Image: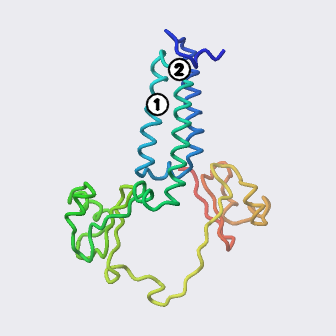
């Protein structure tokens, strides 16, 4: 039954498919164990482990002469080593600097540090591109730009060039409110209505809902004041 695990001279189409299914779900399981940190940002150690795991699993999925068992054991050991490396890097500073090095200063108070740009292995053009993405056209406006370990650039503009906020002008503001989704793609979210202390009768009694059929609603949300916003299919 599990012969597709072992190395063979040839595999049937079903056995190839079974290998692909097992390999896929095993990789999903490994990714789950490694945690969301590996998914959200590939740092040095994450990049190394991703290359290794992908390469190890690719071989038995394309070569019938290789069994799945050895690859799965190897991947499991590498995952344990990865998690151990993450744990030790939190406890031991030298290892933390190896796996998660500090950011590199690229610009400070309008001055470009060319030596650090070379250290980060990027070009001046790449740096200028990132500045343009942040709507910064003049380097002199940059208070600080850092090359992060994940390969991104963090840019901080001098306060005098930043737009005024209500807080700067002493203007009172309303507290942050995240609208709740009560209808999505024509389906009512009864759980949200219950959390809001509302029901279907209340929903359809609102003026915004009286002239629109539920199945024609792409998205409907309600804020803390009970105000409903409706978007229909177009």
**In what quadrant of the picture does the N terminus appear?**
top right
From the viewer's perspective, tell me whether residue 116 is left or right of residue 215: left
Q: In the picture, residue 29 is in which quadrant?
A: top right
128 relative to 83, above or below = below
- Between 87 and 41, the residue placed more toward the observer is 87
- Between 133 and 100, the residue placed more toward the observer is 100
Badge 1 marks a residue whose secondary structure is: helix
Q: Give the residue drawn at x 59%, y 33%.
A: 25
Disc number placed over residue 67 in the picture, else none = 2
- Between 138 and 23, the residue placed more toward the observer is 23
* Residue at the farthest top position: 9
The local crowd at label 1, few if under 14, some if 14 to 19, many if 20 or more residues have their Cα within 10 Å, is some
Q: Which residue is mark 1?
A: 56
Q: Tell how many labels.
A: 2
Return the x and y of residue 63 as percentages of the image width and height: 45, 18
Disc number placed over residue 68 in the picture, else none = none
Q: Give the residue drawn at x 36%, y 65%.
A: 154
Structure colour scheme: rainbow
Return the x and y of residue 102 as percentages of the image width and height: 38, 63
Q: Give the residue drawn at x 45%, y 42%.
A: 49
Return the x and y of residue 38 as percentages of the image width and height: 50, 49
The local crowd at label 2, few if under 14, some if 14 to 19, many if 20 or more residues have their Cα within 10 Å, is some
Return the x and y of residue 5 as percentages of the image width and height: 58, 19
From the viewer's perspective, tell me whether residue 228 is left or right of residue 12: right
Badge 2 marks a residue whose secondary structure is: loop
Between discs 1 and 2, the one toward the N terminus: 1
């Amino acid at each position: 039954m599990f012969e597709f695990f072992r190395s063979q001279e040839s595999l049937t189409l079903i056995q190839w498919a079974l290998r692909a299914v097992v390999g896929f779900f095993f990789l999903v399981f490994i990714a789950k164990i490694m945690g969301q940190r590996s998914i959200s940002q590939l740092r040095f150690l994450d990049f190394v482990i991703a290359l290794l795991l992908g390469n190890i699993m690719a071989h038995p999925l394309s070569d019938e002469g290789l069994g799945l068992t050895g690859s799965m054991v190897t991947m499991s050991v590498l995952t344990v080593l990865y998690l151990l490396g993450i744990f030790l890097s939190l406890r031991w500073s030298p290892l933390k600097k190896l796996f998660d090095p500090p950011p590199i200063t690229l610009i400070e108070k309008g001055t470009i540090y060319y030596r650090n740009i070379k250290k980060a292995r990027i070009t001046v053009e790449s740096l200028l591109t990132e500045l343009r993405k942040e709507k910064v056209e003049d380097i002199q406006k940059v208070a600080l730009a850092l090359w992060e370990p994940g390969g991104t650039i963090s840019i901080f503009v001098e306060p005098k060039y930043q737009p005024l906020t209500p807080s700067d002008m002493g203007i009172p503001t309303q507290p942050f409110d995240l609208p709740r989704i009560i209808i999505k793609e024509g389906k009512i979210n009864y759980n949200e209505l219950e959390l809001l202390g509302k029901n279907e009768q209340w929903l359809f009694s609102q003026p915004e809902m009286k002239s629109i059929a539920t199945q024609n609603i792409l998205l409907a949300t309600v804020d803390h004041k009970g105000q409903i916003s409706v978007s229909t299919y177009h």
